[in-house]
Image (cartoon, rainbow, N blue to C red):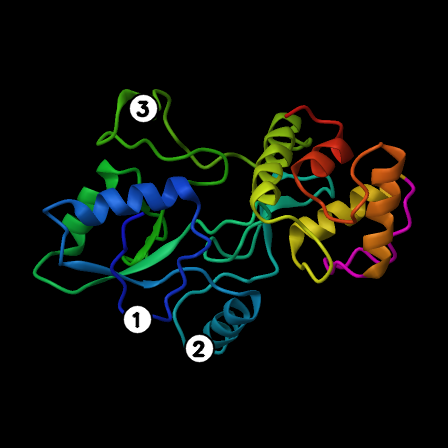
Amino acid sequence: MSELPVTSRTVDLTLLHPEFRKRLEAYFADPRIKGRVKICSGGRTYNRQKELYTKYKNGKGNLAANPDRRFGPKGLDGKGIWRGSWHMQQVDSFVYAVDIRLTGRISWAKAHDVAEDYGIRKTVPSENWHMQPRYTTEWFPAPAFSKDYEINEPVLPPAEPVLPDFNAIIRHIRNVGEAVAIRPLRRRSKGDPVEMMQRRLADLDFRVGNPDGKFGWKTHFAVRNFQRVERLTVDGVVGKNTWLKMWDVDD
C-alpha cells in the first residue's frame, strides 16, 4: 500500500474505501500531479463534522454537510442509507471523500482534469478541494484503468426513489457484511451498522432495548440468542456469517 501525501499527520485516511484508496494512489503517482497536490482532510468523526457544520451555520466556516442528514437509496428504516458527509464513516464502515490542497505549480482545473482520469471528481461546485470517487449509487468511470472500470451509461445523481430500492438494500447488506468480516461488531462497537443490526434483531423478536447504535450488554445477549437459535458459533460477536444470516442473504 502506497503512502498518500498529506499536509499533516492528523489527516485520517484509515477508513478510506479500498477502491477509493487505489484510485487516489494512482492519481498521486501521476507525473502531472506528483509533488503538486496533497490531501488536507480525510475521514471525520460525527463530532468533528458537527463542529464544522455549526461553524458554517454561524457564518464562521466553509460549507459543511449536516451530520444528521440521510440521503440516497432508502434503507430498511425508510431513510437514506448514506449519512451526513462523505467524509464521515458510512454505514458500510468506509469513507468516500477527501479534501486536497495545491502545494506546487498546478491549477485547480488541471488537478480536476487529471482526477477525472482516475474516477475522482469535484462534486461540490463551490469547493475546488472536495473530491469523491462516487455519488450515491455508482462509482465514477475511471478511464485511466482497464476496461473493467468503464461505465458505459451516464453517471447521474439518482432520483430519490418513492419505494425502497430492494436491490440497493441487498447490495448494502452484502457490503456491510464485507466490512464486518474485517471489523466484527462486538461489545462497545458504535455506529450505524450497530443500529441497523439492533433494528433487525428487534424485527426478529430478539430483545435489544433501544436501537441507539451502541453495542451494550442487551445487544450482546440478543446476538448470542440469535446465534443459538440459528446454530451459529455463540460468542456475541457479529462477523460476516452472523450478519448475513440475520438478513437471510447469501454470501
Q: Secondary structure at mark 1?
A: loop
Q: Secondary structure at mark 2?
A: loop
Numbered badge on residue 59: 2
- Identify residue for label 3: 150
Q: Is residue 11 left or right of residue 56?
A: left
List the single residue furthest toward the left.
105
Q: Is residue 154 left or right of residue 205?
A: left
Amino acid type indicated by mark 2: Gly
Q: Position of residue 16 (x, y in %)?
A: 43, 51
Q: Position of residue 194 (x, y in %)?
A: 71, 52
Label 1 – label 2 distance at C-alpha? 26 Å
Q: Counting other residues with Cα less than 10 Å from the Cα at mark 2, is it few (<14), some (14-19), or many (20 or more)?
A: few
Residue at 35%, 24% (x, y): give it.
Answer: 151
Q: Secondary structure at mark 3?
A: loop
Numbered badge on residue 8: 1
Tell me, yes or no, whether the highlighted magenta stretch contains residue 206.
yes
